[in-house]
Amino acid sequence: MADSRIITIDGLVKKFPMGGGWFTALSDISLEFGTGEFAGFVGPSGSGKTTVLNIIGSLDSPSEGEVIVMDKSIGELSHGEAAKLRNRHLGFIFQTYNLLPVYTVYENVEFPLLLLNMSPRARKKAVLEALEWVGLTDKIKSRPAQLSGGQCQRVAIARAMVKKPVLVLADEPTANLDADNSHHILETMETLNRELKTTFIFATHDHKVIRYLKRKISLEDGRVVKDEIVKAKRKVKE
Amino acid sequence: MIALKLAYRNLKGAGLRTWLNVIVLSFAYVIIIFNQGFLDGWSRQAREDMIDWEIGGGVYWNAAYDPYDIFTIQDGHGLPPSALQGLIEDNLAEPVLVAQAAIYPEGRVQSILLNGIDPGQTILKLPTAPLAADIDEIPVLIGTRMAKRTGLQEGDFVTVRWRDVNDTFDATEAKVVKIMKTNDANVDIGQLWVPMNRLQTMMSARGEATTIILSPEITDPPAAVGWEFKDYNFLLKEVRALIKTKSIGGSTMFILLLFLAGLAIFDSQMLAVFKRRKEIGTLIALGMTRTRVVRIFTVEGAMHGILAALVAAVYGIPLLGMLAKSGWAMPEVADTMGIVIAEKIFPLFSIGLIAGTTAVVMITVTIVSYIPARKIAQLNPTEAIKGKIS
């Protein structure tokens, strides 16, 4: 479970302009996450799961309250500082994979390391290691268009994990995958969480994902309605 | 470095669209360089031809002479100044006497200028040696244009009528002893070259001259009382002005081409920002600043300029190289325009021209790439990741 605190959310409110007024997407959310957690925001569409994930990922900022990630207050970060935080400490996994279409599998996974100015030798070692984690070492020269959905998502996981980030944020990572692929992906992420102590936070309403979560935070209309630790993992294939 | 690498990969990925933009832009490169090289080559040839055939190292005009005022020709002559006598004796200056006259080829009357020149002169390329012919008629040298206009051929006779310094009209027969070919229409059209001593006798102007052409070897022309020295700046002014006019006309063509190429790249960039917003969002999520993403897209657009330069080099270097070697044949009509223009212009493609053109194209392409790329800075990354427009 959590060793030390890496995320503190205190009184988070997020409002978006809508028409002439404001729409409140998140209301008074206060949470903490520690190293090595395998947690997820669950709830129906529009409950605010992705919004809170975006704010933790410094892609968006709070309207009120404070979100501290790796000792950095998200609301006070400049564009450059937020980019640096994402570059060094965060990994993202998206529902639609978001792989760069003109790059090969190898180049997609290598990309975050290019931004870290790593040496070519260190990059190669890290990329091959990450591709080994997800079982895609035989596809390094393929382009995303040549891969299945499950393979694309595994590339996305390798890209998120290649720099060994402290935190990986996964927004509906299995929404476009069938049951077999979903379980395979989740098992991969669970292994990485266990072996590398990387914190995973999901935004999902997919029961296949929910079954794997060790901490489940239920959101409804932008409010936390339940925050529970799930003791026993249930791997039930649908 | 990353920006270049990414831009190159993306351009490669864009396939046909990239190549269409690159090919149009490469036309702009080649046409701009050809057009300017052609004008530079013409300018150089015109200067060289005028120096060789007409003005040498500069010309002294008698103070009363103005070639643009026909009425000054009658009186605009005199004895060469003492300051130039030494140069004339050493064949470093060549006096020319100019007189108005009329000829009657094939029964028609045609106004011409008689130019008296020493048949042994060496300062100009005019083939004056045949003027030394010892014949009763006046030996005359004419150019091919003049021959065509008058229907005269070598060995033909023609009546010449002139008025001497005492306003007395006289006439005699002249024999065409030589027809010369020259690029300089100023020494050809309407001009008859005759031996200096014969013209001085005809004009009753013994020892006098209208102009004195200096050898290009003389770099420091002496001052001469009663004579005005006209240097290259003055004498080449008209040719330069004409080429400048042509240059402006040519510029319109390449500005249009550059505009079209720029528009295509602008359009591609706009489309790229619209179509690739998901990629933009992903780049930001992976840790790129918006500024850096803007830079990548700008470099990507600017790289069209680099690729176009390479493509232009592939077909432009052999094509323009061949033109520089074999020349560009001018239409016959240009020969009769009264300007210094060769049958063939050899374009001059200098390093400065190529570097300058490359810089102009690159700057233009970078600007048109940057303008749409700026929109990226306004994209909301959370929307962009999903491929939505915010």
Image (cartoon, coloured by chain):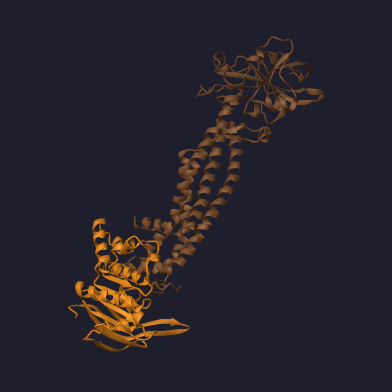
Q: Among all residues in the image, which is located at the extreme left?
A: A3
Residue A25 falls left or right of residue B183 = left
Q: Quadrant of residue A108?
A: bottom left
> Which residue is rendered at x = 17% and y = 78% of the image?
A3
How many numbered circles does the render carry?
0
Q: Kindly indicate which chain is depicted in brown in the rendered structure.
A: B
Give B150 or A142, whichever is nearer the viewer: A142
Give B82 or B288, whichever is nearer the viewer: B288
> Which residue is rendered at x = 26% and y = 62% of the image?
A128
> Residue A59, position in %: x, y?
35, 73
Residue B298 falls left or right of residue B144 = left
Instruction: Tell me the colour chain A is drawn in.
Output: orange
Q: Among all residues in the image, which is located at the extreme bottom?
A: A225
User: Height in image: A19 above or below B179?
Assistant: below
> Which residue is rendered at x = 49% and y = 63% of the image?
B270
Residue B128 falls left or right of residue B155 = left
> Residue B347, position in %: x, y?
54, 36
User: Height in image: A31 above or below B265?
Assistant: below
> Residue B221, position in %: x, y?
53, 23
Quadrant location of the C terminus of chain A in the rendered image: bottom left
Give B290 or B195, whichever is nearer the viewer: B290
- On the question of residue A63 being in view, the answer is no
> Residue B119, position in %: x, y?
63, 15
- On the question of residue A142 being in view, the answer is yes
Q: Quadrant of residue B214?
A: top right
Quadrant location of the N terminus of chain A in the rendered image: bottom left
Give B333 or B188, whichever is nearer the viewer: B333
User: Height in image: B221 above or below B281?
Assistant: above
